[in-house]
Image (spheres, rainbow, N blue to C red):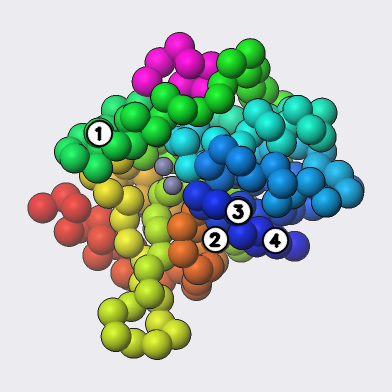
Amino acid sequence: MIKRLSLRGCNAYLIDFEGKSYLIDTGIPGNLKRVREMEQIDGIILTHGHYDHAGSAVEISDYFSCKVYAHKDEHPYLEGLDEFLFNGVVGKIAKRLERLKPMAHFKPSDLKDLDISFMHFPGHTPGSIGVIIENSIICGDLVRVRRKHLIAGRYEIKPSSRNFNWNQKAYIKSLERLAETKVSKVYPGHGESVTLDKEVLKRIVDRLRE
Ligand SMILES: [Zn+2]
Ligand SMILES: [Zn+2]
């Protein structure tokens, strides 16, 4: 079961795995008060290390004394040893926000240690991942979902902005790989969860390649 929590900054999801409760993504800093009432969180999984997803990882993991799992390629960015790349005006703002991420003494654990089903989707960031649960994927910023213009109750899948992507070429490849999976439902970091239309996804890939 995938339960969505409304945290500030991004969608966070709660999943049960082998009798334990895992929180996927944490939003911007300051979200502990929104999850404090929960009985237990046994681990935190980060789809990637951006400020709007990893911002509350330290405070929540300290409170629940649980580990934070992320892909190995994301660790240097979580440990403050490297900085994400951003472009354009919005990218400049994102870069400034990244510096506010409280990552001191932060030691992420390798997601591989957890035995949970995930796919590595480098591109948005080096260590971006999607957590796979049956036919669903919790995909972080691999795609976002937006309300369709002027049509109530309809949503559409959008690619992540190039300005926020670390490597656009790798990103497009990752989208293509998502289109090849059996996944039929996406739970994005931003927007509503929707049925994944593979044809739409392939069209997005073609358009990005132009
Ligand atoms: Zn992101
Ligand atoms: Zn995001």
Mark on residue 7? Answer: 3
Ligand 2 within 8 angstroms of badge 3 C-beta: no
> Which residue is labeled 2 in the image?
187
Mark on residue 92? Answer: 1
Circle 1 SS class: helix
Q: Are dots 2 and 4 in contact, CB under 8 Å?
A: yes
Q: Earlier in the sequence, mark 1 or mark 2?
A: 1
Q: Earlier in the sequence, mark 2 or mark 4?
A: 4
Circle 2 SS class: strand
Q: Quadrant of the N terminus?
A: bottom right
Side of 116 where 48 appears, left or right: left
Q: Is residue 66 above or below residue 174?
A: above
Q: Is residue 195 above or below residue 113?
A: below
Of 110 and 55, the residue lying toward us: 55
Q: Which residues are magenta?
A: 75-83
Amino acid type of the residue tagged 1 in the rendering: Lys
